[in-house]
Image: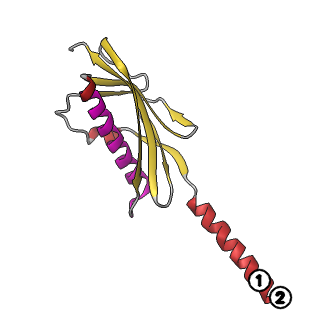
Amino acid sequence: MKLKHLIALAAAALGAQAALAGSHTTTYPLKPVLDAQSADSKVAFYFGDAAHPAVSASLGEKTEGIRIARKTDDETTACNEALKQALDALRKDATDAGANAVINIETSFHQMHTASATEFTCATSMSAAALKVHGQLVKLDAK
């Protein structure tokens, strides 16, 4: 009888561990991350269908995937940091291509996509936060 209880307890513990190991995907507001961006950046970001000046040259599309360790951060803090790092990578891609903006930016994790001017998609697990950003590298007309 004790063996049955031990087996049941072990099975329950493994099930609980598997549930905790899964990722949770949701959306978060863009504003805190965009507000923290450097004001002197030479690359502007336009998420979703946000209005922007006329495009004078299209320089291709770029996707960056980011996965960061969560440390002791809550989900929101970890996802904000993941997006910050993804935007840093997009900024470098844009600069290298001679672009001054990235437009139509979408965020995703696996099958969940967000093309919003106010929110982004991010996934968290107990150990990490992850997302992908995708956008068009462009030169915009001067304002």
26 over 60 or under it: above or below: below
On the rendered structure, is 36 left or right of 103? left
Residue 1 numbered tag:
2
Residue 68 numbered tag:
none
The x, y position of residue 63, in whole percent, is 42, 32
Q: Which residue is outermost to the right?
A: 1
The x, y position of residue 24, in whole percent, is 55, 51
Q: Which residue is outermost to the bottom?
A: 2
The x, y position of residue 120, in whole percent, is 44, 38
Cα distance, mark 2 to mark 1? Answer: 7 Å
On the rendered structure, is 97 left or right of 126? left
137 over 2 or under it: above or below: above
Occupied quadrant, residue 62: top left
Helix or strand or loop: what does disc 1 sit on?
helix
Q: Does the rendering let one see residue 51?
A: no
Helix or strand or loop: what does disc 2 sit on?
loop
Q: Does the rendering let one see residue 56?
A: yes
Three-letter code, disc 2: Met
Question: Looking at the image, which is closer to me, 121 or 60?
Answer: 60
* Contact between labelled residues 1 and 2, with CB atoms less than 8 Å apart: yes
Q: Which residue is mark 1?
A: 5
Tell me which segment is drawn in magenta. 72-95
Q: What is the basis of the colouring in this image?
A: secondary structure
